[in-house]
Amino acid sequence: MALAWPLAILLVIAVPMFLGWMHGLLVTRLNIQPFIVTLCGLLLYRGLARYIVGDGTKGFGSTEGFGILKFLASGRLFHRTIGEESDGVTHQRVVFEGIPMPFVLLIVVAIVMWFLLHRSIYGRYLLAVGRNEEAARFSGINTRLDIASAYVIAGLLTGVAGVLLAFYTNSISPSNHGNFYELYGIAAAMLGGCSLRGGEGSIIGIVIGTALLQVLQNLVNLLGIDSSLNFAVMGAVVPIGVLADQLLQGRSRRAGH
């Protein structure tokens, strides 16, 4: 029983990695457009998940035995409380709220991905393939392997995020969980300086873009804007940010010449 949940977690992470590999094969071997592959995958997997759970929500109930996962999903690092006795009764007082574990994991993943993308030969190859796949192939890079491996890494991170989200909410709801997250990811990457054409972008920029996107959402709430307009506000602001970034890049290129 003690090994049941670790094996389940490994399976949950291995499945999206396998699906990512399949997506990579569809893109590299059958030359199907990546957008079509990922969009159809989104619809297919969400539909299957909703069918499996009967289009409902499955809760975990007690999280006893899953303390480590619960801590990783919603715990805090360096959280500190002290006890104060008053009239014979001990009262708990929070001294330091601590650092949210999801934020700690975000930093760890960002550091690992930064080294992988910007300080490794594989990362250089990946950026070269994104910039010009044909030129990269003629230079001796195995473009098919690089592209497929990128989908596998995306599947790995998707599996980890799914586990954290499940234990953060203590439930599984395919009809609600992850809705529009793919759009948030695209928006955050674009705000962080990534190009949809490929070959440009940085991990630090993506982290900053994600933070800006969250700040934007919080700003909408603080300004008292109707929550139904959240997507409209983001849909208006994100293109402005991307356009400003392109203008600055164009100016820097002209200054370089």
Image: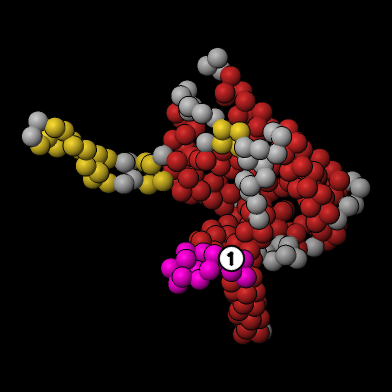
* Residue lying furthest top: 1
**Residue 74 sits above or below residue 118 on the image:** above
Could you tell whether 107 is left or right of 153 in the image?
left
Could you tell whether 222 is left or right of 188 in the image?
left
* Residue lying furthest left: 87
Could you tell whether 215 is left or right of 115 in the image?
left
Place residue 204 in its image quadrant.
Answer: bottom right
**Residue 66 sits above or below residue 230 on the image:** above
Callout 1: helix, strand or loop? helix
In front of the other: 147 or 215: 215
| Type of amino acid at the residue the image marks with label 1 | Ser
Identify the residue position indicated by label 1 in the image. Answer: 228
Whether residue 226 is in magenta: the answer is: yes
Could you tell whether 84 is left or right of 73 in the image?
left
Quadrant in the picture for the C terminus: bottom right
Residue 231 shows up from this direction = yes
Q: Which residue is painted at 9% across and 30% down in the image?
A: 88
Q: Which residue is painted at 37% across and 47% down in the image?
A: 99
Place residue 86 in its image quadrant.
Answer: top left
Can you give x and y, in whole percent of width and height, for residue 143 in the image? 81, 50
In front of the other: 60 or 192: 60
Q: Which residue is painted at 75% across and 59% down in the image?
A: 130
What segment is highlighted magenta in the picture? Answer: 217-232
